[in-house]
Image (spheres, rainbow, N blue to C red):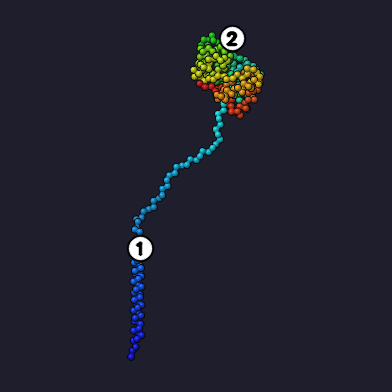
Amino acid sequence: MVKTTGKRNRAPIIILILLLLAVVSILSRSLLKHEDVHITHAPEQPFAPETPTVKPKQEPVEKPAEKGPAPQPEPVKIAVIIDDVGYPTHTFDGYIQFPGKLTFSVLPFQAESVHSAQLLHQKGFELMVHIPMEPLDYPDKQPGEGALMVTDDRDQVEEKLSRMIEEIPYIQGANNHMGSRATQNPELMFWTLTYLQRRGLYFVDSLTTSGSRAYEISLELDIQSTKRDVFLDNHDDFAYINGQFEELKRFAQARGTAVAIGHIHNENLLKVLNEQLPRLEEEGFELVFASEVVTN
């Protein structure tokens, strides 16, 4: 007789295991579906190349200006004219060695006029013709050969001036020697100044009288000109001349330029000039030629 009890007892167990497997399979599928519900995929975007970032154009930043040395003020100009060149004098050699700018005014028709002008020109100084003109106290005071007189007509004036200018070489300008009467005569001054203008010469009114019309007429004619501010050496005394030079500097400081006149035969004038020269630059002054201060 064949026994079947063991096989029957195993059958329910196998069925149970199969049922369990089926349940696990169903549960696993359910979980997977549940996850699919919550996962979303972003829609695909068409490919586009990356746009480069454009940075805004920056304006150039100006660098602050570097601070350099403060600009120096223009020096105040002083011109010194030395009159009466042509007379023999022991001071000439000292003046010709002067290391600064001086303007020498040469009297025509004197013993040393031409030779002195040549030597001064070689040393680099500026030259003028020192035109003799009639003074108020003529004939007690004689202005010199070929002087312009109030009784002269225009032809005489121009003939005299032509002789003076032709005799003195290298001149660039003119001023009056004496002339306290002549410079007050408008007609005589008009003839004189128009002739100088034609010859390309500037004019400095020595201002030997407050009534001079020379500078006034030179302005009307638009000729390069100026006038004297200070006489340096009415007395040949060192202290006096030095005081006059200080006065000259005050004039120049107030106006920007100034003109002084001295005379070649005065020894103390040369001493003052040599002492003042190194101080001028320190004090903001510049010694210049007369041509550097004339205006029109």
The image quarter containing residue 266 is top right
Marks 2, 1: nearer the viewer:
1
Q: Can you see residue 126?
A: no
Tag 2 residue: 138
In the image: residue 65, left or right of residue 242: left
Q: Position of residue 222 (x, y in %)?
A: 49, 19
Circles 2, 1 touching at the beta carbon (< 8 Å): no
Q: Secondary structure at mark 1?
A: helix
Tag 1 residue: 38
Question: Residue at horizontal 36%, vertical 70%?
Answer: 28
| Label 2 neighbour load within 10 Å: few <14, some 14-19, many 20+ | some
- Of all residues shown, which one is farthest toward the bottom? 1
In the image: residue 3, left or right of residue 194: left
The span from disc 2 to disc 1 (Cα, nearest Å) is 133 Å
Q: Nearer the viewer, residue 140 or 148?
A: 140
Q: Nearer the viewer, residue 152 or 279?
A: 279
The image quarter containing residue 95 is top right
